[in-house]
Image (cartoon, helix red, strand yellow):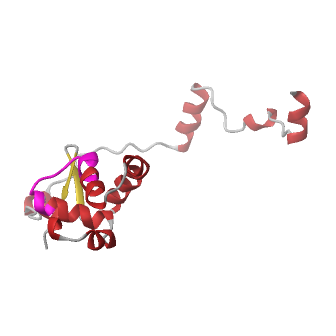
Amino acid sequence: MKISKMTKEELEVLSYADLTELILKEGKKGLKTPDVFKKICKLLELTDEEYNNQIGDYYTSLTNDKRFIFLNGVWDLKERHTSNIIMDNDEDEDDEEEEDDSVVETVESEDIDEMEDEEGLDQDDDDMGDLNIVSDDEMEDDE
């Protein structure tokens, strides 16, 4: 049924998202958020104040509704848009037979100790030894 032939009572029963779907189907193209919500407000005879108070919730409802897609600044019906996903599942037998040319270097534990000494790192240093635990009361006393 065309939205223009529906009574106000019939329109009031529908959610804003349902009205948006009908408007977009009749319009054959996407619309910006304010434009489509102004059409809804006009159909439902809502005031400018109601428009301003509800447009944020309206936008949120569209973002959560899987029927709509937001592309290039306009809302449109997702069913009008397709995505082409190309998956290449063909594996060449040659790929599986190729050798791995990556080099893995083995580091002995003595070498690690030497590197730490050179960098000034010592596993036995306890950096946490200089820290003190301070209670909330002591923090307030300092202020």
Q: Quadrant of the C terminus?
A: top right
> Residue placed at 15% from the left, 65% from the top?
4
Q: Quadrant of the N terminus?
A: bottom left
Q: Is residue 20 above or below residue 117?
A: below
Magenta stretch mostly in which secondary structure? helix
Q: Is 89 on the left or on the right of 141, as rendered? A: left
Q: Is residue 52 above or below residue 84?
A: above
Q: Along the line of sight, which residue is nearer the eye, 5 or 103?
A: 5
Residue 14: where, in percent of width, then height?
30, 71
Q: Is 143 on the left or on the right of 123, as rendered? A: right
Q: Which residues are magenta?
A: 25-37
Q: Is residue 89 magenta?
A: no
Q: Is residue 118 visible?
A: yes
Where residue 39 sits, quadrant-wise, is bottom left
Q: Is 89 on the left or on the right of 61, as rendered? A: left
Residue 135: where, in percent of width, then height?
87, 42
Q: Along the line of sight, which residue is nearer the eye, 118 or 6?
A: 6
> Residue placed at 27% from the left, 57% from the top?
40
Q: Is residue 136 above or below residue 114?
A: below
Where residue 85 sits, quadrant-wise, is bottom left
Where residue 131 sits, quadrant-wise, is top right
- The total of numbered circles placed on residues is 0
Q: Along the line of sight, which residue is nearer the eye, 16 or 41?
A: 41
Q: Is residue 87 visible?
A: no
Residue 82: where, in percent of width, then height?
11, 60
